[in-house]
Amino acid sequence: MKLRNMREDDRSAVLALHIESWQKSYRGIAPDAFLDHEAAQRLGEKWHHIALGAEDFGLILEDGDSVAGFAFVRKTPPQVPLLDNLHIRPGARGAGLGKLLMAGVAARLIADGDIGMRLIVLRDNTSARHFYRRASGIEGPEFMDDFFGTDIPAHEVVWADLSRLL
């Protein structure tokens, strides 16, 4: 496994993994019609417009020639950075790869002078919520998140001390 910065030429592999992960993880949470027919187009548009740079950044976890996982962080002041996406290839989950990505994100943010981060997790994505709790994330109250036009119950998870992820 190799952790590295996301590059422009990673977009198609990241998009494919993002779609696969959503279709596996969000089945029964998000509308099936969205997952089966709209997710690929919507996520394609999203990844087409994402700017990789000094502020917003992505990390790739490579397994040989394939992408085993990725994380993408949005740094939008004045809020703390947002871990916008963290996905592990469904067949590779449970092997500690998410933990590696979280540590990589934390190290990068700390190097940039950030001390915390946050993310949004869907309420019924119980495996992700469990993972973030084990990773010392503090879950806030439930709220309704606009998930591409559908309100879905979610929680904000916050890390006030990124060093706990290292």
Image (cartoon, rainbow, N blue to C red):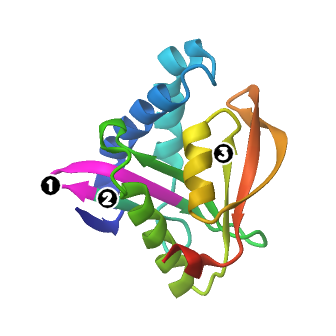
3D distance between C-alphas at marks 1 and 2:
10 Å
User: Given the image, on which type of amino acid does mark 1 rest?
Assistant: Gly
Is residue 66 shown left or right of residue 41?
Answer: left
Q: Secondary structure at mark 3?
A: strand
x and y percent of residue 34 in the render?
A: 58, 18
Q: Tag 2: Cα neighbours inside 10 Å, few (<14), some, or many (≥20)?
A: many
Question: Is 4 drawn above or below residue 14 in the view shown?
Answer: below
Prevailing secondary structure class for the magenta stretch in the rendered image: strand
Is residue 109 shown left or right of residue 120?
Answer: left
> Which residue does the numbered mark 3 point to in the structure image?
121
x and y percent of residue 28 in the render?
A: 59, 19
Q: Nearer the viewer, residue 95 or 122?
A: 95
What residue is shown at x 57% (from left), y 12% (from top)?
Answer: 33
What residue is shown at x 33% (from left), y 52% (from top)?
Answer: 95
Is residue 96 shown left or right of residue 156?
Answer: left
Label of residue 61 in the image: 2
Question: Does 151 lie within the magenta span?
Answer: no
Residue 58 seen from this side: no
Is residue 160 shown left or right of residue 30?
Answer: right
Residue 24 seen from this side: yes
What residue is shown at x 45% (from left), y 27% (from top)?
Answer: 24
3D distance between C-alphas at marks 2 and 3:
21 Å
What segment carries the magenta color?
Answer: 62-72
Question: Is 124 drawn above or below residue 139 in the view shown?
Answer: above
Of label 1 and label 3, which has the lower sequence position? 1
Q: Secondary structure at mark 2?
A: strand
Q: Tag 1: Cα neighbours inside 10 Å, few (<14), some, or many (≥20)?
A: few
User: Given the image, on which type of amino acid does mark 3 rest?
Assistant: Val
Asked where in the image residue 64 lies, by quadrant, the reply is bottom left
